[in-house]
Amino acid sequence: MRETGGLVMTRPKPEKRKNAQQRAKERNEKRSNGGTEAAEEGAAVTTEAGGLLTAHPKPEKRKNAKERAREKYAKAKTEDGTTPMTAKAKSKVEAKAEAKKAKKAAKVA
């Protein structure tokens, strides 16, 4: 056996591992102090619920089909100045026009 002269040799205790929130905080501090492109452009770092930091705002809610169609067709105009229609709407209009013509022809006859 080897003698150590009365001293007990122990290895130093390793540092406690940081949790994700602490690592993210340090990473954001380094970025802001380091002068990255995002910091130079003035990207706002906002604090949201739960203490999480984000470099961009929350995206707006996705629009439903009706709202998307309104936007799409509001910009487009046809040659005669009317707004274009979907295929379903066109067929409905055509069917109405034909029914009207048939009704008129029945009255006349």
Image (spheres, rainbow, N blue to C red):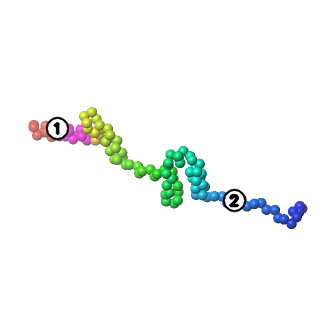
Q: Residue at x 34, y 47 (%)?
A: 67
Q: Secondary structure at mark 1?
A: helix
Q: Earlier in the sequence, mark 2 or mark 1?
A: 2
Relative height, residue 55 to residue 86 (above, below): below
Q: Are marks 2 and 1 in contact (CB under 8 Å)?
A: no
Question: Which SS type dominates the magenta stretch?
Answer: helix
The answer to whether one can see residue 87 in this image is no
Q: Residue at x 89, y 61 (%)?
A: 2
> Camera-side residue: 23 or 87?
23
Q: In the figure, is residue 76 to the left or right of 18?
A: left
Q: In the figure, is residue 57 to the left or right of 75?
A: right
Quarter of the view holding residue 8: bottom right
Q: Residue at x 50, y 48 (%)?
A: 42
Q: Residue at x 24, y 38 (%)?
A: 94
In the picture of the structure, the residue carrying the numbered disc 2 is 15
Relative height, residue 85 to residue 18 (above, below): above
Q: Position of residue 58 (x, y in %)?
A: 46, 52
Q: Secondary structure at mark 2?
A: loop
Q: Amino acid at mark 2?
A: Glu
Q: Please identify the quadrant where the N terminus is shown.
A: bottom right
> Camera-side residue: 17 or 55?
55
**Which label was assigned to residue 92?**
none
Mark 2 and mark 1: span between their CA atoms?
Answer: 87 Å
* Foreground: disc 2 or disc 1: 2
Q: Position of residue 108 (x, y in %)?
A: 10, 37
In the picture of the structure, the residue carrying the numbered disc 1 is 101
State which region is magenta: 91-100
